[in-house]
Image (cartoon, rainbow, N blue to C red):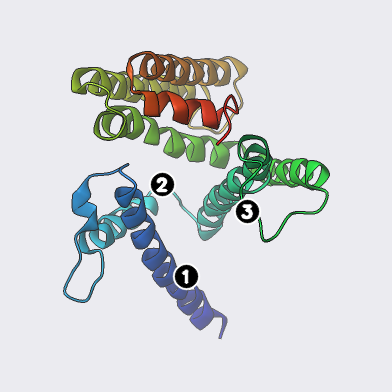
Amino acid sequence: MFLTDAVVSPAGTGFVSTGGATRSLYGISADGYLPSWFLALSRTRVPKWSLVTIAVLGALYLLPFPTWQSIVSFTTVGRVLTYMVVGGIAVQALRRTAPDLPRPFRLWAMPVLAPLATLAASLVIYWSGFSTVSKFFLAVFVGLPIYFGYYAYKRLNVSLPISLSLGLIDAVGIALSFSYFYSLTKGLKVYNDVGFLVYVVVTAVLIYVSMAVLYRLGSDYLRREFRLVFGCQRI
């Protein structure tokens, strides 16, 4: 029975995750963050290229993980981080930048509960382990070249040479800093404060410089978007 469940349960989770991720990729493309060919539908109204992409990425996703436990740990970090951003952090940001939006439900004691929820989520991520968290944030940072190299050009009216340059610099900088970090930690098996500090500082500088360039050279829409994100302007 346990062996059967070990096959059936992950298979069901895989089918659900594939369907959800396919439609998430479709929605990201509809928002302009990815090329429009992800919006193409099959005869059965399924986002076909999104489904193919998710299937390939899902197969590649399994390669770095030697055990089922490591896959669960990595996935848990992703889900908790997503909750932390759209939960406690987002509700506080929206109360500040959009105080007059209609709210059928208003969270009771938000100034207390939201920070506590963010703290609890942060602890779950911290307890997932050094190796898992390091790999996850590398996967998160892979999105930076996509944002600065594609979305900035397609939706934020930044010139193509600038957006491609930013995307390339981000990709190379993150790859080199993580490689240095990876080598100093012997494959993320031992701690190394210097390597970790270099990795964090390089990534932070890349993000800051890229956003400063976009803010300086982008459109008024981009500057308004940045001000809303950082709470400098209200909706």
Q: Which residue is mark 3?
A: 102
Confirm or deny contact between disc 2 and disc 1 (CB under 8 A).
Answer: no
Confirm or deny contact between disc 2 and disc 3 (CB under 8 A).
Answer: no
Q: CA distance from mark 1 to mark 3?
A: 35 Å
Q: Is residue 41 left or right of residue 178?
A: left
Q: Which mark is residue 13?
A: 1
Q: Few, some or many C-alpha atoms within 10 Å of disc 2 (few <14, some 14-19, many ≥20)? A: few
Question: At x 30% / y 34%, what residue is drawn?
Answer: 151
Point out residue 223 in the picture as x, y percentages from the top left corner: 43, 23
Viewer-closest of 229 and 83? 229
Measured along the vertical axis of the image, is residue 150 above or below residue 60?
Answer: above
Q: Which residue is mark 2?
A: 64
Question: At x 38% / y 31%, what residue is drawn?
Answer: 144
Q: In terms of secondary structure, where does tag 2 sit?
A: loop
Question: At x 34% / y 47%, what residue is drawn?
Answer: 31
Q: Is residue 182 visible?
A: no
Give the mark, 2 or 1, whose residue is nearer the N terminus.
1
Q: Few, some or many C-alpha atoms within 10 Å of disc 1 (few <14, some 14-19, many ≥20)? A: few
Measured along the vertical axis of the image, is residue 95 above or below residue 156?
Answer: below
- Dot 1 amino acid type: Thr
Q: Which mark is residue 67?
A: none
Q: Which image quarter holds the N terminus?
A: bottom right
- Dot 3 amino acid type: Pro
Point out residue 201 in the picture as x, y percentages from the top left corner: 53, 15
Measured along the vertical axis of the image, is residue 225 above or below residue 4?
Answer: above
Point out residue 55 in the picture as x, y percentages from the top left corner: 29, 60
Q: Nearer the viewer, mark 1 or mark 3?
A: 3
